[in-house]
Image (tube, rainbow, N blue to C red):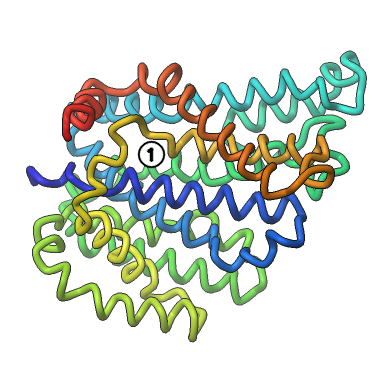
Amino acid sequence: MDKINTNNFDFLRIVFAATVAISHLIELSEVTLFKNYASFFNARLAIDGFFVISGFLIAKSYKNSKNVKDYILKRIKRIVPAYFFVILFCALSFCLISTKSLNAYFLNAQFWHYLLANLSFQNYIEPCLPGVFQNNLMCPVNGALWTIKLEEAFYLLIPLFYLITKWKKRNIYILSLIVYLFSIAYFNYFVSENMYRIAKQLPGALAFFTVGIIFFTNFKFFKKWKHYFILPCLILFVLEHFVWHTQLLKPVVYGFMVFYFAYSIKFLNNFGKYGDLTYGVYIYHFPLIQVFVHLGYFKNYNPWLVAVILSLLLIIISAMSWHFLELKYLSENRKARQSNLLSRK
């Protein structure tokens, strides 16, 4: 297990975050030129990749924690500070672009519903603020945050997962298979009923997370035999995703593709040495795009130039969030790993 921390997960996560951000940029900006590139940025695949990596890394975090309390505290410190900041910042500052007066904005029940719903990770209850983004394609302040509650649920399920295998003497592979099959059945049922918005929630997303756990549990085995598994996985993925349009083995084969890439390209191992901007890119991009659309930048100026400026601003905001907000709350082990990355050439 000594090589488990030498990987490309930092690179993969920033690629997935950027894919989601660009996908939302294309959708929210409504720029015709951008729509020609929409097929190259599959947000759903990127999110599924996130879930596989989360399963792997969160299982590792749990195993490396002193106890459940230590594990939960580490998860809270990683997610909550930046998350609460973006919710509160948007809620308080967007009064400046609201169509309502300050009194009407802050005394509006929708404002308080937004705060309560979003601070409790229930973004779907009230995604919009009063008088904000009313003329945009959609009014949600941060439509990307729906996955955060799934991540939180994953965090809570991991201890339960391992406790069941320990207390009830259940085989981890049997339990994983049961969870996987249940997730697949749930997802495919609601897709068949044209209810994708429900299908993608829990437990529909659990299959990818469970696959990540199994890859962590059998790290040495999969790393040793990865070159033999990758071609069949690629073939099955192409068939399921592009030909059959099903999701039966896709979490396994796509998950292995993510695992293979993470442990195969050595020159990307130090990608995160100057900071992990992934979380920042993910949680800040949506409101930033919405503000640019609201101010008419994409309509009034060259949309490519606006997109470049927006991207640079997003990188700066994400870097500031990492160095001044996220980094100080990380566990000592995570800080040590960051220092080790910086020391490598």
Q: From this view, report whether residue 156 is shown above or below residue 184.
A: above
Q: Residue 338: give x, y in percent of width and height.
A: 25, 28
Camera-side residue: 53 or 96? Answer: 96
Name which residue lies at 83% across and 40% down.
296
Q: Residue 67: give x, y in percent of width and height.
A: 21, 28
Q: From this view, report whether residue 319 is shown above or below residue 206.
A: above
Name which residue lies at 32% across and 76% down.
234
Name which residue lies at 63% across and 59% down.
197
Camera-side residue: 228 or 177? Answer: 228
Q: Residue 128: give x, y in percent of width and height.
A: 76, 36
User: What is the quadrant of residue 129 in the picture?
Assistant: top right
SS for tag 1?
Answer: helix
How many numbered markers are drawn?
1
Camera-side residue: 275 or 195? Answer: 275
Instruction: Classify residue 344 as left or right of residue 192.
Output: left
Q: Residue 315: give x, y in percent of width and height.
A: 51, 34
**Which amino acid type is shown beneath numbered disc 1?**
Leu
Instruction: Classify residue 233 as left or right of residue 84.
Output: left
- Locate the C terminus by quadrant: top left
Characterize the local packing of mark 1: few (<14), some (14-19) or many (20 or more) Cα atoms within 10 angstroms.
some
**Which residue, given by chain and number where applicable, does mark 1 sit on?**
156
Name which residue lies at 63% across and 37% down.
309
